[in-house]
Amino acid sequence: MLSYSKKVIEHFKHPRNVGEIANADAEALEGSPACGDMLKITLKINEKTHVITDIKFESFGCASNIATASILTEMVKGKTIEEAEKVTWKQAAEELEGLPPVKMHCAVLAVDALKSAIEQWKEKKGLTDKNPTTPDKVLRKLRNVLNPLTGASIVRMQLLRDFDVKDGVIIIDLDLTSDHKFASHIKEEIHEKLDHLWDIKEVKINFVGESES
Amino acid sequence: MNEIYLDNATTTQLDPWVAEEMRPWLLEKYAAPTGHFGHQASLEAKEKLEQARAAIAESINAQPEEIIFTSGGTEANNLAIQGYLKSLKKPVHVVTTAIEHESVLNTLRALQKDGVELTEVGVDQDGFIKLEKFNAALRPETVLCSVQLVNQEVGTIQPLAQIGRICAKKGIPLHTDAVHGWGMVGLDVKKMNLALTSLTAHKIHGPKGIGALYKRKDVKLSPIMYGGYNEFELRPGTENLPGATGMAKVIEMMKPEHIEHIDKLRRMMWDAIGSQIPWVHLNGSVDRGAPHILNVTFDYIEGESILLRLDMQGIAVATGSACFSKALEASYVLLAMGRPHEQAHGSMRFSFSRFNTTEEIAKTLNALKEIVSDLRKLSPLTPRKEA
Ligand SMILES: Cc1ncc(COP(=O)(O)O)c(C=O)c1O
């Protein structure tokens, strides 16, 4: 077994805020069982104060998946959505006294699910204007794409050689060869993070790494 | 250590009698079995090594000089495949199955870079090789087939006698990875027309780090490691005599009543799971499966969570889930059987040995019922009405 912190085990054994809120104000389903990871988050949000008054989750996933979702619900319950949106996957992992690197993607999934739910609520309430996608936003999203083995972001690993946003097309050059072990995985993750942006028609990913041999 | 060990397909407890048999060859009689011109101690060691070789040969209906000791199943598979293909002129074509152990599949895939053509024949939904596909895959330039005896994850016993007949008719040598199955199910190199057969000791209570390759007399191999002239000049290195001694003892210890007992545990476990836990699937076959392996999918939940919860209660099992990351696929064996990813992620392997008891199975079952029900309460996929 991977070595998990006491806190991960504690949350895995006794997950908090499990279930589904009836008449939720917002909800999000992230991941898929095919990937071995899936999370559903439902929220109650006070319309005036923006405080998250209730949050519940359901998970098809491994111990880290359950534990990160559980701790995240504790971290944001009673906070405003604006505060909740600032919680990063790193903070969630830290709050759990660490996660094994291969499990960092579980924290990303949990935080992404929460953000999606909040975003959905804001859209419903007309609180977000549809801002055009900026390079800055793309970079922020790419910071959440991890190398699956090391658990470090592809941005930090300097795998992102170049990228551009133009006329609804995002072009990304990765410093990887297309036959790299994780090339297709990273590609899939990037599509997951960017494809749904409202003003993006296409995401092009190029593998521009030089092969070693 | 776990109180209840149901991961015997990964490795097994060393039988104390086997350890006892090995002890003198570790502590007192440590001379190397160098052969005819050595000192007294080495002659004695040589004799013991040859006794072990003969016992292992007999267990599969082979001759002693057809047994080459190796460091285990992985090396036996590598020596069989690489050693055989190395001696041939290119181009060559090899046929195997999609569910072989990595030590076969990755060896063959690595050789593709050197021009070896490879066909990986698929299996049906129960994990058995598709014979008509296998037949169709054979070509005039096919020089080797490699089909395992028992699958490491789902326990299916492949119809090797039939496959052997097909290969014999076409004059294609057949290699089998019998790492799972040796001592558990029928294995007769003559009846099955086998040219090469890989064995290991540690799956049936022998020590780790010792195995053997059966090589039929007429089959030519080149060594894949270079060094001294041990093991018919095919496997250099000072022989692992304590290991070989243990390996021979292991096969002597394996009795029909042990196999019956193991088979009883497997059937008991599946009967109980199938009747007491909803939404489960058997991966493999009860009647055409090896006695020691049971693989079950629990719908709507993920394997690692089940494994961890069982582990907390002192019960060791294995899972086909790889919730490491999406890149590390769920079990390729289950995917080859056509199981969707989500079912592969919820699969658990329970594997038994003669040291397990019916009480352990009952305990595991109780723990499992609670855990599966708990995790399903957490899962967004569980059908709510019936839950
Ligand atoms: C089917 C199969 N072949 C080969 C091996 C490798 O054997 P060993 O561990 O002795 O190298 C294993 C187990 O690990 C196995 O299950």
Image (spheres, grey):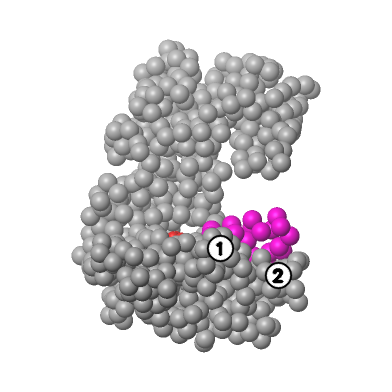
When the figure is inspected, residue B37 is found, relative to residue B11, above or below; the finding is below
Of all residues, the one furthest to the right in this rendering is A167
Q: Residue B78 carries which label?
A: 1
- The amino acid type found where label 1 is placed reads Asn
Which numbered dot is residue B367?
A: none
Q: Assign the N terminus of chain A to one quadrant of the image.
A: top left
Give the letter of the chain under mark 2.
B
x 52%, y 67%: residue: B229
- Determine the residue positioned at 74% across, 22% down: A164
Q: Is residue A82 above or below residue B50?
A: above
Q: Quadrant of residue B99?
A: bottom right
Magenta-tinted stretch: B102-122
Q: Name the residue under label 2.
A: B88
- The amino acid type, in three-letter code, at marker 2 is Leu
Q: Which residue is drawn at 74% across and 21% down?
A: A165
Between disc 2 and disc 1, the foreground one is 2
Residue B85 or A164: which is nearer the viewer?
Answer: B85
Relative horizontal placement of residue B203, taking residue A154 as reference (left or right): left
Asked if badge 2 and badge 1 are on a common chain, one would say yes
Mark 1 CB in 8 Å range of ligand 1? Answer: no
Image location (x, y in percent) of residue B381: 45, 47
Q: Do the numbered discs 2 and 1 sit on residues whose CB atoms are within 8 Å?
A: no
